[in-house]
Every structure is written in C-alpha cells, then in structure tokens.
Image (cartoon, rainbow, N blue to C red):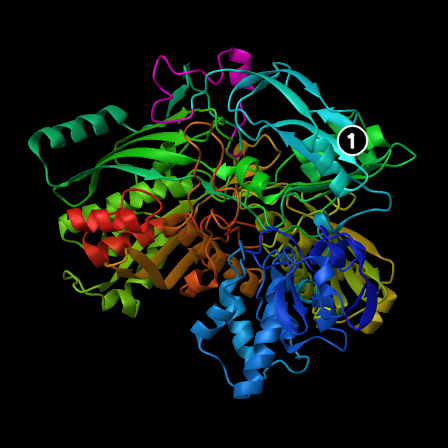
Amino acid sequence: MDTTVNGTTAHLGPDPETTAAEFVRDGLGLTGTKTACNAGVCGSCTLLVDGTPAASCLLPATALEGRTVTTVEGLAARGPHPVQRAFAAHDAMQCGYCTPGFVVEAAAFVDRHRAAHGDTEPAREEIADAMAGHLCRCGAYPGIYAAIAAACAGKHDRDGDAAPPRAEAAEKAAGRARYTTDIRPEGCWEAVIVRSTRAHAVVAAVDAGGAPHVDLLGADRTVRYVGQPVLAVAAPTPAKARAAAAQVAVDYRDLPAALDPATAHRPDAPVVYPARAERRAAPAHAEGGVPPARWRGNVRGPFSLNWRGATAVDRIRKAARTGDPLLVTGVFSTSVQAHTPLEPHACVARWDDSGHLHIHASTQTVMALAAAAADRWGLPREHVHVTAEHVGGGFGAKAGLRVENVAAVELARITGAPVRLVFDRAAELTDAGHRPGARIEVGLLAGADGGLAALTMDAYSDGGASIGGTVAIMGRLVYGHAPRRLRDFDVVTHRPPGAPFRGPNGAQLLWALEQSVDEAAHRLGEDPIALRRRWDGNPKRRALYDWAAALPVWRERSTGAASGRFRRGVGVAAANWIYLLDSSTAVDLVVEDGAVVAETAVQDIGTGARSVVAEVVRGELGLPAGRVRVRAGSSDLAYAPSSNGSRTTASVGPAARDAAEKLREEARRRRAGGSGGLDAAALAALEGVRVRGGRRRDRRGYATPFPLPDGGALGRGFTGAVHVMEVEVDTLLGRVRPTRCWAGIAAGRMYADRPARNQCEGGVVQGIGYALYEQRRDDPHTGAVLTSDLEEYRIPGIGDTPEITVHFHEEGWDHVPGGGVGIGEVSTIGVAAAVGNAVYDATGWRPHDLPIRPDRLLEGIGAK
C-alpha cells in the first residue's frame, strides 16, 4: 500500500492500529505534525488529505492509501506558503506547538477564500468558524486572526522586507522547530507510567511481569491519589510498552480516603499526612518555598501576615453589629484550573559510553534540572547535559526534576538504550499540576471618608495532596496600609497535587478582592476606577487608572439597569505582582560566519526569550536581523534563569546588553566598525571572537535583600495591570461572551514589543478560560479525575477570544538594569475578576463562584 506525502511516494505498513499521525511522525520523520490530545479536539495533528484538512490522530494510516497528503513541511516545498509568512509576520504563535496544525488548516481556508472571493479579508466570524477545531493554550488567537485575514487579502504572497517579530517564527510556522516529543534517537525505547487506581492505599506488592521497570513509590509504599505514579516500564516500541504496562499487577491494601475539601477538616476524616516526616515531604504548589504553619489533621494553618490585625477585626465586627452599609462581606470560590500545555510533559534520556547523562526535556528549568540530576545520580555537573530547544508551553508546571525525568533516566540505565517517556492527555490533566481551588471569606469596610478602613480575609486552598496556599497574604501588598488580618489555610485531600500556575495564588486573591472593591465603589456611589485610584498609592498603576478612565468604553458605559435578553456590561479589575531576577545570568556572544550568535541556556517556552536576546543584541550593535542568531535551551551554554516568577526578561535582557557592549568595545579595540554599528567588514575582523556579558552583581537599588531557594532574588517594586472588560450576557441561555478587552500593563521597557503584546493577549485568554469555562471534575466516590481529555476539560478557543487592546506604561523602572521586567503573571491574574465585575454591571447579579457557568448565572439572576 502506497500514498503520496509532500510529492513523494511512501509505503504504508499493514498495521491497522497505526494512525496517520504516527505514520508521518515516526515512519517518515515529519515531526512538524504534532499530537497533543489524540482525540481529534485540538487540531495540532492536522494534515491535508487530498487537499482537505483531517485530524491525523484519529485517521488510520491505511486510510491514506492512494491519496495525496500534505504536511506543514510540504506547504513550504516551493517556498513558504502565504499563511506561513503571515503567521511569522503577525506573531501568530507563542510556544508554537499548535502552530503547524493552525497553519495547515489556515492554508486550506485561505486558498478556498481567495478562490471564491479574491484578495479580500474575511469577517472575523468566518475565521473563527474555520479554526474552530484548533486550540492554542498560550492564547495567541489575536495574532492568528490578523495573520489569516492578511493572507486572505494577499498581503504575504512574497517575502517581506521586515524581519518577523519573533526570532524563531519562521521555524515554528514551517514545522521545523524541534520539541522533546519530536526526539527519538536510534534504538530508542518507549516508557509508560503505571498509575494508581486508588485514592488511598498501601501497595503491598507489584508484579511487572518481567518488563524492565523502575519503582516510583516512596518509602512508605503509600499512594495518596488516583493517578499517582507507581512504577514505569519500558519496551522497544510504544505498542509493546503499553502492553507491558497493561500487564502490571499491583496489590493494593485500600485505606479510607478524604476526597471532599468541604469535609476533610472534620476530626473523623482520614488523614492524608499523619506523620511529621510525611507532612514535611508534602508537595508544594507555591513558588519560592512554603511558609511555616501548624497542622491539625488535614488542615494546615493559619499562616498570617497582618497589619494591625486586631484593629481590622474589631472594625469589621463593629460594622457587622451595627449593619454598616459600607461593610462588604462575601464568600468566594474558585475552581481547579489545569495547566494542560499542548506539549505534554516529556523526557528522552540516554547514558553515553563515558558516563555522561543526556536529557531532552520539556522543561521551564534547564539549569535547575541539570543541577538536580547531577545531585541525584552523583555526577559532576559538567557530565549532565539537558536540552530544551523548544518547549510547548509550561505555565509553571514544568519545573525541576520531575517523575518523567527520573523514570526515563533510570530506565535508560537499566536497558542500556535511550528511553522516551511522554505523558498522555489524561495524565497531563490529572497529575501534571493545576492551579488550586480556593474558598475565600472576605470582610472589607469602607470608612465614612471613603477610605479603606479594614480588610479581613481567610482563604482555604484546595491543592489536593499539595500545600502552599498564600492567597490571603497576597492582600498585604495592595491598597495601602489600612488595618488588615489575612490568614491562609491549606485543606489537603486524597486528590492530585497542584503546581505553581502563572501568578501562583494571585488569581484566587483577585477574584475575591477585586469584586469586593467593586462592590464597595457601588455602595459609596463612586466610579470603580476612581475608587481604586484613591486607595492605590502605586504611581505606575495610577497612570493605568488614568488611561483606563479615559477609554470611551468606560466613559460611555451605561450606569442604569440593563434589560432585555442580551445585556452589555463593562467591568474593571486591577492587579499587582512581584518580579524575580537572577544576577548570575550570563549571555555569550560569538562571531561565526559573519553573524553574531548569542548563546544562553535559557529555555524559551513561548514567552519570547530568544526575541528579547536578539532584539537587545541587534539594537546595541546596529545589526540587521539576518546577522544575529540565538542558540538557546542547553545546560552546556551560559547560565540562565528558570522561566518562571516573571524573572526571565529581567535577567537575560541586561546580560545580553552587557555582552553586546563588550563585543562593541572589542570592535573598537581592534578598530573594526564605526559609530553606527558593526558592518560586514567589522564582523569579518571579529570572526571567532567570544565575549560574555552578565547582570550587574551590585544589586542595590533593584533587588531586595531576600534570596530565594533557587538562587534568584525578589526584585524591588511591583508590576501592575488594569483590565477593562466588556461582556455580553445572554440572560436566556446563561452565556457570557467577552466582546472587547483593554489590558493596561506597567512593567517598564518592552524589549520585544509584539511578543510582549502577544503574551499579554494570551494572559487575557487564559483569564477568560478561568472565569467562564475551566473546571476540573472528580468522581466523588473514587477520586478519579473525570475531565481527563480536552473535550471534557474546556479551554478557550479562537471564537471565545474578544478583541484585545494592550497598552504599555513603560515609565517608573529606571532603577532596574535594562528598564523592564517580566509580564507573564501580572497580565492574567486580574482578568477573571474583570469578567465578574462586567457580569455584575450587565445583570446586577454578582458571581461568587468560578467558573461563571450558565446554570449558576441563570440561578443567580433568577433569584435576584
């Protein structure tokens, strides 16, 4: 049986179980086609079969017999397709893992549209309909809209003069970018993790049936949630590995389980961590360590951070006794939000003949992973080589030495072969981390003078078997110095543990706090933006309030009660966030073949780290785009920070600038180049020269004296955001549709403008998902995660995306080298609250629980 792939005849095997995706990826090595959901939901595996888009993860390879297949690589066989040029030009991507599927589908749509309508732009709704079968977890939809519209209008039929705004854009649009899931060395074995089917049990025995395996349980042999890794097996092929995993027999001795956070605090509830040593080893869902607190059964806390706490409590209690109308009280709740990056957690490990360990990993922490691996396996640090050339999203969940790394490395040692381990989507949605849910009790009192008189907040975090809730204490960092008592509790259960997620604990805080502030404004009869501006002393956010207040959508909003089926509302929410930095960061510049190559270990998870380095070097040296390349994502390169904690830009940007200054100084020393930059002759004279730049070691003025466990530091000052959201509420069906959003961000200089805007747009999209759709559901009897695929766990698609305008306030960061810091977290944590306040503006009903589901909305407005 034969088929034609990208113009070449290819032989199909007889196995009816082989999918078309497996055939092109594993059989032909065309790894531009991705697999993410294996259920036909996400679109990343899209191929053209006889010119028609098809989900290749569901299509048997045998169905390709006698047909013509085009992959993303084939679209560029005679030069890039206009869609590929457009995606690169409009930065219609972030991590890029979903990009090939979007590009293939968009190419078919653009060709059809132009054949029928000529070079005209389609309506936004047409593009949304055409791309409805595709998902982008990063939320790069605004760029995708723009790229497809421009390609339909014939604006990208030829290569443009301007370089794409993202350094690796052309690679991603053409399917050439290589991810860990694309790595399959010769002789590679496949590994599968066998996971617990019990929420709480002691594992008495395991029979692996003779397959090479590694035990993944702790010394107590106890499983504490359904989906916990028990052991991993390996075999020469994926099918044999799955068969070996299916044959593993686990002897469980079942124990009672605490599955409901609403009852886990009771004295008779089964205890998740009965021993002190177990409590100390509990996984954490926070970044930067877990604050100390007492345990009482399954409740850990309180951990408090107060300011005149007794005064705050006295004022709140007195206001409650007297029925003060300016006292706002409420109980708010948030649901679990899964990270679910489209590239699943993955690792490929091998040992070479000299005892060096080579790890390809989908990780946010290349250097930290290398250090942890060296420590675990007793190796010199220089004998561990971690590579993450491209990473298909992370959002906080891919940090450190994880179970997929341990299993792959140990099995590679046992088998003597490279071993590849990739999570399936069920594992990704169960045991790859999540933003914990929370129950938040708020008391907020406005004074007779209109000031903030007191704030109390008790937050109960639901991170499953993990700890680290700091939801309430984040409230110490906003709205001045009014008295406040802030207490955090963790309620642990026999359910999967959480992990840091893009602004850990911040989104939960702001969902409750920003709606309470909004309610206070309504009770005072004051403009919600004006009230925030009075209460908030941060000058950078005050500039954002002035910008937001001047928006026509805000000035012209209706303040009366809306009526009719479809009701429009406008809401606002502010956000405050920290940033981190790593003063050990370095960037090497080497002149090779007439170009400057920047080398840095930093992993680019889609946040634009390569582009930051490239833009700095180009700008400092006056070089065109073609003369600067970035080599990144390897622990063998110059030290770089992790991609979390909004630290990457604040660390690599100044290091790249320092390296460029040193190279320019070397050019002056050699009398090569002029004041306008380095020309070809200067680069020729510098051929082979290598310089290293780093962050300024003297951290006075921009870093606090508080070091972090991973070697970084807390930066001085806070980033800020103000989101203004417009929604349309369908009061018949209970649906909320965000229509427009304005995102104001205060984080200083934007090193790479378009990728920065893209990240902020993606933050809005993820915040909308948190507000309206995303909710993990568990079986109340077994603890199994029920939302274990992307049909059941709903993330936003392109049609859910409003029109988004991003505004950068870049002043106020002169004390920071480079003048700018990270934006990945502050750009998303306040979005859900802005949606909630807009729903209130539209309906008069204030949502307290996330997500704002249709049934909740209909019940709420019906009761009102």
Whole-percent x and y of residue 314? 18, 26
Magenta stretch contains residue 574: no
Residue 501 visible somewhere in the drawing: yes
Whole-percent x and y of residue 223? 57, 21
Crowding near the residue tagged with mark 1, few <14, some 14–19, many ≥20 C-alpha atoms within 10 Å: many
Decide if residue 311 is on the left or right side of residue 300.
left
Q: Residue furthest left?
A: 322
Q: Which residue lies furthest to the bottom in this view?
A: 118
Decide which of 543, 508 is in the foreground and name it: 508
Magenta stretch contains residue 277: yes
* Quadrant of the frame with the N terminus: bottom right
The magenta-colored residue range is: 259-287
Q: Which residue lies furthest to the top in this view?
A: 275
Decide if residue 770 is on the left or right side of residue 178.
left
The amino acid type, in three-letter code, at marker 1 is Leu
Instruction: Please tell me whether residue 809 is drawn above or below residue 828 in the rendered image.
Output: below
**Among the 4 quarters of the image, the one containing residue 237:** top right
Whole-percent x and y of residue 455? 25, 34
Residue under the image location 71 percent in, 66 percent down: 71
Decide which of 218, 196 is in the foreground and name it: 196
Please give the residue where the numbered disc 1 appears in the rendered image.
411
Whole-percent x and y of residue 546? 31, 61
Decide if residue 632 is on the left or right side of residue 219.
right
**Among the 4 quarters of the image, the one containing residue 540:** bottom left
Judging from the image, what secondary structure is the residue with disc 1 in? helix
Q: Is the magenta stretch mostly helix, strand or loop?
A: loop
**Among the 4 quarters of the image, the one containing residue 561:** bottom left
